[in-house]
Amino acid sequence: MKLVMEKRLAPSPLMRSLVPVVAAFAALVFCGIFFAVTGRDPFEVYYAMFSGALGSEYGISETIVKMIPLAMCGLGIAIAFRMQIWNIGAEGQFYMGACAASWLPLTYPDLPSMIMLPGMLLLGAAAGGMWGLLAGWFKTKWLVSELITTLMMNYIAILWVNYLVYGAWRDPKGLNFPLTAAFSESALLPSFGDLRVHAGIIIVFVLAAVLAVVFRDSRWGYETLVIGSNPTAARYAGINIPRNVLLVMLLSGAVCGMGGMIEVSGIVGKLQPGISPGYGYTAIIVAWLARLHPAAIIVVAFLFAIIHVGGFMVQTLGIPSAVATMLQGAILFFVVGADIFTNYQLRLIKNEGGEESE
Amino acid sequence: MNETLLISILAASITAGTPILFAALGELISERAGVTNLGVDGMMLVGACAGFIAAQQTGSLLSGVGMALLAGSLMALIHAFLTVTLRANQVVSGLALTLFGTGLSGYLGLDYVGQQATVVFSKLAVPGLSEIPVLGPVLFRQDLLVYCSYILVAAVAFYLYRTRAGLFMRALGENPAAVDAVGVNVFGLRYLYVIMGGALAGLGGAYLSLAYAPCWLENMTAGRGWIAVALVIFALWDPWRALLGSYLFGGIDALGFHLQVIGLPVSVFILNMLPYIFTIVVLILVLARKGGRLAAPQALGQPYDREER
Amino acid sequence: MTLPLISMRQITKRFPGVIANNKINLELYPGEIHALLGENGSGKSTLMSILTGLYKPTEGCIMVGGEEVKFASPADAIASGIGMVHQHFKLIESFTVAENIVLSQSKGGFLLKPEQIIADIESLGEKYGLQVDPRAYVWQLGVGEKQRVEILRMLYHRSRVLILDEPTAVLTPQETRELFVNLRKMADDGCAVVFISHKLNEVEELADRVTVLRGGCVTGSAAKEDMRRDKLVQMMIGREVLNTYEKNCEHCGEVVLQLEQVSALNDMNTVGLNNVRLAVRAGEIYGIAGVSGNGQRELAEVLAGLRPAMGGKIFFYGQDLTNKKPKEMIEAGISYVPEDRLGMGLVPNLDSVNNVILKEYDGKFSKGWRIRREAAIAATKRIVEDFDVKLGSIFQPVKMMSGGNLQKLLLGREIAAKPKLMIVLYPVRGLDIGAIEAVHKLLLQLKEEQTAIILVSEELEEIAKLADRVGVMFAGQILGEFPVSEMDTEKIGALMAGITEAGGAGV
């Protein structure tokens, strides 16, 4: 007798929605046990995290602030992943978008916000888009894996921003700190009341809605879905694959670039190193857990933001903020591990009948 | 530039390149066997942290190194289980490993942050060899782990190209079905090499916390794990080129400190960009020269599924 | 003769619902070249998969050198001295020739001795006339050289039984001649060579003994001196009398498709289509008979715009459509129903609705940038009803459906698009009798609607039943073409084997 994994023909729909929830919970339990073993009260940790992130206006506001870049990058990534294009360059595209968007207020600080903000958004999208497009071009032209190029281009983008803020763009009045001058008022996204939550949230929701419709209803959404599922059938149906690779990388990068613009304009108010603590990478996990669905991306981004902010909050208890990243990683392990139940059936079979069939 | 400065920069390049070299060798082994592991940074951090704690607790460097190897292996085991057995997406699993490792090391190492290592790998001149002009002080006035890394590179290269087991390991990354067809256990071997990769990443981390720094700081790899991933590609999956690449990265690191002394009118950031640009250019050139043939192991990133043979 | 090297006794292999091999006996002697003849699906590959350890026989046994063996895996077969060269080479492109050769055996010393290995390979190559540089990388080699590497690999591991699966399919005539000379040398050296083929002329030229399979059974065998071509053909394609059906092409209309000297390359970059001339009229079914792999897929792909024509012209209603894009071909009204339903014709992970709109998502089923979801659902329901497709839900991934229903869905989609020309490849392959009947009815219905149809099939019975005219494809050419009423098995069988009326072997 032996235990075999049998592939289900189609993932069971019940499992598909149930499993991630159970798995996320299991991850909490797992980490909780770990906390207990290392001498901390898990209930105290989780209480501090969730009450910190959700128990006050300030906490909720901070959570949304973290959710915005995660959701933007997650949406951008979903565009590419849907077509099985592995754009892991969201981080770099985010930086390039932030950088290009910063150019406008730094060069023309006196523009009215009616021109300034759309201009910045456009520049951010264009820069992020071009950065993505370049990788797409390498792929279509020389078959260079986008996985590698987008990863490399992340470093280049981050270093490029550093180069600017340590050099040409450094604020001469900034006491030699690696910062650009603060943006003028007109270059800042409006925020809600005294909170840090800013108009970027609107962009996130609008974009998610647009993408949800585009993915579900549009001809182009259909094209990319077919290419992602069966490129041979796509070719058979007359769908232009190279053009779509370029387009998808352009759009994916553009959305991540907009994310960068929103971050500098909504939160930072200037360009500086480290504007993203790895949003572009975490967002890959967000998009994956959300199964690339725009609405779900917002939900998962919010969940990850809770953990992130919660991790920040528990520091007051002498608990390292690192619990947050640990928990995020563990959730993914458990969800991926649990996928075995959606995609496979476990069956006991007798050893003898091990017939292969082709 | 005078000679002593040159020598000190070159020696510093090797020291700075060594943690990357260990991690890159590990990733190279894993990728040659067909499994990408983007969790290198996480595995390095856990290795650095675990190694540091063990060394502080026991006062023994050996137990520090042993613990780092073990911690890296255990991290890699998670990745192996998810990607080899469960056939999960390797990119996503690796990213989660980095997140998890960053968090785990931060959590475990909290009480040790900022401590100086009580036992460290100190420089040991190799008698005789260290007297060779220029090369001696550069190569042979290093610490024990650096000497280990020389041997390790040679051993990995020898294993890959000169042994039957190495041939099968390479085939694992190219065409696992061919390996399966002659009755070799694909799954078991992939586990083995992914875990070896993790152990070496852990060792790279321990080099940071027990030799290079030597202390424990949260996130002390500062992205070196990612550099190791890039480096494997830059090296086109060859151990000797990985060695050169590591020292190149290390050299750029070391040069950054001395830039003003030397008076080079180049930004350190532009300098730092070069390896990544080179990597992309190298790939394009290789692909163009070989008429679209990929330099990477052909089965890299694909889970092996017997039924879909 | 001496003791057989291999004897397979009463081998039976059952797959769910099919008997692939039925009580087959086969003996292979050292020094002999043994041809295995049969059409696709006759059980040749299953039999060889059993001999090479890939499948376990349901019944029967294998004796190697007089002793019974049980192969648990291909590795065991290799260890017993049995080697096979598959049609699709199993070489690692980025490895050198020598490395590939060493790789096929897991046992041996820890260290590789490259100089020794290279010397061994070179001396083997010299001995058998298999010239190839052991230091070269496989990706640098041509097809013929790769085949030599595969053969060398068997020899290097001291295989005594060498199985070659249609080795000449990828070779030029020059290379084929060399191969034959070399195979003879190996046989003379005491190896048993198994040569799988469906080309009669080659079998006659090379084999000392031939065994013919049909429908999983041995239908005959002959030694060299008793080989007669007509007899072999009969064994291969059977003796059943073809039913003649009343055909009238009075209703056939104008010429829809005209091909003039169309040539194209195959996936191996050798000639796949060779100066094909062909005309099909509206309401006519043109059957293409022939063993698969003789240019049928290439022909279909050229017509679908998926493969460039290297020469010649394609006229569609008099309009030149040579080398147009797939989309333009679809819009012109050419429908291609591929043999690989899930690999090409449908998208397995998507539901029926999304599959129905595959080729018209930007035509009938769209309005501006949007997909007309309601229209798509309505059309899907109509197809499911009209074509009697059995499925759980139209919103389930199509990969859950059975082969027959997949085919009905695929044909339904293509027919609903009202094509002017349909080229359909092996439409009933893998289907049960009920589904076959249904598919045939659909094609006849389409003919009534004045669609021109090119039906590619290996089943002569199917062609006799449906087609008005028949052409036989061999080596990328249409060798003979006649009204289906004049078709008889012997004539077709000869053409399928590449024998033209002039008496000699075609190309």
Image (tube, rainbow, N blue to C red):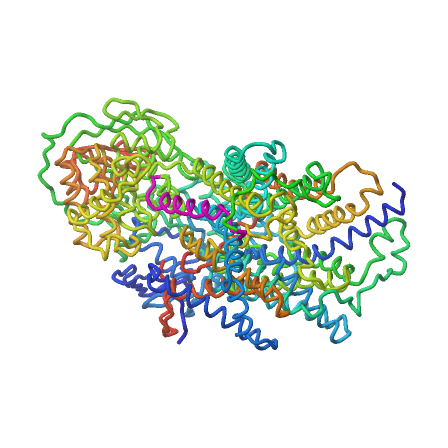
Magenta stretch bounds: A194-219
Q: Name above or below for residue A323 compared with residue C267.
A: below
Position of residue C198 in the picture relative to residue B16 (left or right): left
Could you say which is closer to the camera, residue A61 or residue C46? A61
Question: Quadrant of the rendered structure where residue B27 is?
Answer: bottom right
Q: Is residue C326 visible?
A: yes
Position of residue B20 in the picture relative to residue C358 (left or right): right
Most common secondary structure along the magenta stretch? helix
Position of residue B61 in the picture relative to residue C227 (left or right): right
Question: Can residue B67 be found in the magenta stretch?
Answer: no
**Residue at x-position 14% and y-position 45%:** C441
Q: Name above or below for residue C256 compared with residue A127.
A: above
* Circle count: 0
Could you say which is closer to the camera, residue B52 or residue A187? A187
Please identify the quadrant where the C terminus of chain A is shown: bottom left
Find residue C52 and report its horizontal and vertical position in percent: 42, 60
Could you say which is closer to the camera, residue A226 or residue A255? A255
Question: Can residue A210 be found in the magenta stretch?
Answer: yes
Question: Quadrant of the rendered structure where residue A344 is?
Answer: bottom left
Could you say which is closer to the camera, residue B12 or residue B115? B115
Position of residue C437 in the picture relative to residue B293 (left or right): left
Q: Please identify the residue farthest to the front as the structure is shown.
A: A193
Please identify the quadrant where the N terminus of chain A is shown: bottom left
Find residue C103 and report its horizontal and vertical position in percent: 55, 56
Q: Is residue B84 visible?
A: no
Find residue B18 and report its horizontal and vertical position in percent: 74, 56
Q: Name above or below for residue C112 compared with residue C278.
A: below
